[in-house]
Image (cartoon, helix red, strand yellow):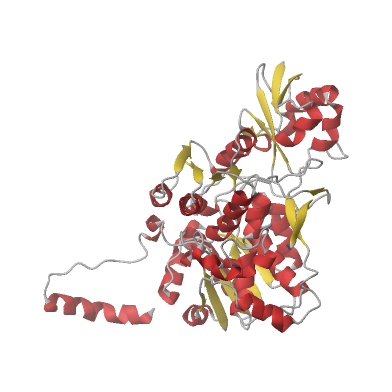
Amino acid sequence: MSVTVKLPVQLRASAGGASEASVEGTTVGEALASLFESHPELRERISDQQGSLRRFVNVYVSGEDIRFLEGVDTPVTDGAELTILPAVAGG
Amino acid sequence: MAVSNLKCRECDATYPLEARYACEHCFGPLEVVYDHSHLAGGDVGELRRRIQAGPQNIWRYADFLPLVDGAPGPSGRLASRVGLPAGCTPLIRADRLAQRLGLREVWVKNDAANPTHSFKDRVVSVAASRARELGFHTIACASTGNLAGSVAAYGAAMGLQSYVFIPADLEEQKILSAGVYGTNLVAVKGTYDDVNRLCTELSAERDWAFVNVNLRPYYAEGSKTLAFEIAEQLGFELPDRCVVPVASGSLFTKLAKGFGEWQDLGLIEGSLPTMTGAQADGCSPVAQAFAGGQDFCVPVKPDTIAKSLAIGNPADGPYALDVARRSGGSVESVSDEEIVDGIALLAQTTGVFTETAGGVTTATLVKLAESGQIDPDERVVLVITGDGLTLEAARGTFATHEIEPTVESFEALGARNAAEAWAR
């Protein structure tokens, strides 16, 4: 499954300036693993030492927060859009 | 200049004073760091007089606000002639409310008395002034309602373009009170959290100052002025407890920061007031995390009449939980019915007509008093953040009596209602 990951401005320097990346995977977790393979420096930015998403990172599949879905086990279909954003906005 | 740099609350990485809000290393929130060494160690009385000699608005606290060039305007003393001055709202002694609840000393900090009727004018004052310093021509925001009106008004007053993004199902009164200022009003089909996500994405694509996204570190500092005013209006003393509405948790957290900064300088003595956070049952991620003993919030889909507090994914949730716990307070939640009763109780005992958020705050104080979680001798400050513009929520809290235009008709009514009215 080919998935587009939209990168927040805070991560773009670590991805060669790109605002999005094309990755493979059938779940959010697989898509992120694929992203880390092509851009290793993104791993520690998004994940903590246990491999979980950092608490100030939000991930959305087609606009829905994955915490309302199945977290990193949320399935993604071909052509899906995964968005990574800082959680500290608003209010 | 008292402000030195931005710093990540999580990993301490530092950044220059730019339009940025999240740490590039760990995504933690960035906060403004000050150097108050020029104020420390001196004569506290002198420092108090310096504050008291300032303008009658938030810029009297310019030493504690993140503008590089100091208070806006030709001079500090003339700052009230610039833009739309916010702050210096009344702190009202609410003896009738206290009596009703069996408490000794209750104060209402009526922040509905700001230019656009909510505390948001404090944060927008700071963010819009910082936006101008940074050279932006457009200010923008994601809003649950009150912020929209404030950003639109400050855009108008300061000659900045503005874009305000709101959930499409917002109360009509809130939409009208933003649109009138000639802003670009964008109604998004979704919840506030959807609006917030959209604005976070847009902030990377537009050269705009989103006050609560890329300017959030500066914006949030404006909330400290509420703490400074409470302390100053109590004669440079701290209350025992503050009851504060919680949406993103930013106001709640910054009140504690404001008290702390003044304690550090010796401007006020004593320990941090007990901080009680107030949420609606239909959107209570912080109250749920508090009750569950967690240090993070699980996001929720809001379903409450308290739309100005309807943030299901609170950015400062973890820090609000920390403030509640280390101050010996808590984060409570109340039902929509209790919120309406709270609006009516505040209006009928103090003369202050608040919106649903103030109903949440008042109902939370009622809950504390009724359950005995509060010492009757405490000095309590109820933070009322917005005006009763959401008239719909007040429906059913009173009756209108229709009469013929004759004295007899009125007297017949009065005889029946006098006892009721005086009993309140």
Which residue is found at the position 41% from the left and 46% from the top? B182
- Please determine whether, in this image, residue B424 is positioned above or below residue B283: below
Depth check, front residue: A78 or A70 = A78
Residue B103 visible, this orientation: no
Q: Nearer the viewer, residue B404 or B369?
A: B404
> Does residue B199 lie above or below B83 as drawn?
above
- Residue B148 on image: x %, y %: 49, 49
Quadrant (top left, top right, bottom left, bottom right) of the N terminus of chain B:
bottom right
* Of the pair B83 and B117, the residue shown nearer to us: B83
Total tally of numbered discs in the picture? 0
**Which residue is painted at 68% across and 38% down in the image?**
A67
Quarter of the view holding residue B268: bottom right
Q: Is residue A51 above or below residue B251?
A: above
Q: Is residue B263 visible?
A: yes
Residue under the image location 52 percent in, 58 percent down: B335
Give percent across and percent down for residue B333.
Answer: 59, 59
- Return the residue found at the far front: B74
Point out residue A53 in the picture as x, y percentages from the top left corner: 78, 38
For the view shown, which residue lies furthest in the right direction?
Answer: A49
For the C terminus of chain B, the quadrant is: bottom left
| Residue B198 placement (x, y as % from top left) | 58, 36
